[in-house]
Amino acid sequence: MAWKGKIFGAATGFFIGGPLGALIGAAAGYQLDKPSAMQQLQHFLISDEKNTTQTTFFNTTFLIMGCVAKSDGVVSAAEIQLAEQFMQFMQLSDAKRQQAIQLFNQGKQESFSLTNTLNNFQQHCQQQKHLVRMFLEIQIQIALADGAILAAEEAVLLKICVQLKVSDTQYQRIKRRLIAQQKFQNYRQQANQDKTQRGNLSEAYAVLELQTTASDAEVKQAYRKQISQHHPDKLAAKGLPEEMMTLAKEKTQQISKAYDAIKQARKNSAES
């Protein structure tokens, strides 16, 4: 609670004008304690900008998701299933789920403008590089839904990268990591066999974008970098919609599991 201005005003007023001066000084101090109109305006503008960023990210995600899914001429059952799983995973309300479905279907239409949609996304999200990375990861995951990225899907993804100023090197690195992440999850769900364990460890390194020859220090540095890029609190501060916080948390858990797998393997190797 703000009170310093009132105490200062009352004390000064009492010194100058006695009890009556103290009352007048306290009233003046109250005005000092109140946030200025400029501060209130700045708070409103920041809050409004964040809300706009969240809405833009949500809408663009599902619009482009539909566009990527339809890029090869047909939306596969796997792509529809992944989109539905994505919505369920986000625990969308009925209203938000219907909105997401409408946006997904709108993105599939021939009349849909990829350029205009990305222009709007750029206007509100381009400066937040972590948001742009998260957005691109979602689209790549949709393209990977049926096992591989087809040429038509790749063409759309590359257009997105060009317009969002994501280099081809960055795109290829993100794609390799997501493919490895997908395989890492699959290995963890399979039987505990030597072959599976070797593959699991290989993909764990790829999730952290590392070679198996990386030093312990490099492994830790790569882990911290990935966690920083996907940390839910950091993404929320940048404008990630609340509905997508579960996705960010899941990504950090997957990164941590890959890191733990590498640490355990190195510990076992050192003890043997």
Image (cartoon, rainbow, N blue to C red):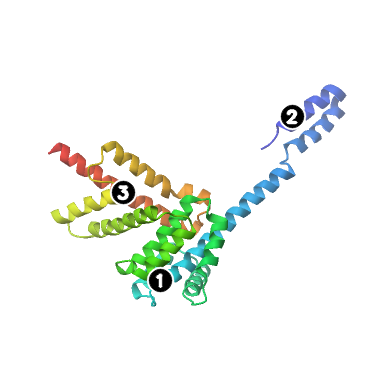
Mark 1 touches mark 3? (CB < 8 Å): no
Q: Earlier in the sequence, mark 1 or mark 3?
A: 1
Which residue was labeled with disc 3?
A: 209
Tell me the quadrant of the picture where the C terminus can be found: top left
Tell me the quadrant of the picture where the N terminus can be found: top right
Q: Label 3 neighbourhood size at 10 Å, few (<14), some (14-19), many (20+)? A: some
- Horizontal arrangement in the rendering, residue 107 relative to residue 175 (left or right): right
Tell me the amino acid under the disc marked 2. Ile
- Residue 180: x percent and y percent? 28, 56
Mark 2 touches mark 3? (CB < 8 Å): no
Tell me the amino acid under the disc marked 1. Ala
- Residue 184: x percent and y percent? 26, 56
Q: Which of marks 2 and 3 is nearer the N terminus?
A: 2
- Horizontal arrangement in the rendering, residue 233 relative to residue 205 (left or right): right
Which residue was labeled with disc 2?
A: 7
Q: Label 2 neighbourhood size at 10 Å, few (<14), some (14-19), many (20+)? A: some
- Horizontal arrangement in the rendering, residue 211 relative to residue 172 (left or right): left
Q: Earlier in the sequence, mark 1 or mark 2?
A: 2
- How far is disc 2 from disc 3 in space, using C-alphas? 58 Å
Front disc: 2 or 3: 3
Which residue was labeled with disc 1?
A: 69
Relative to residue 80, is residue 271 depicted above or below? above
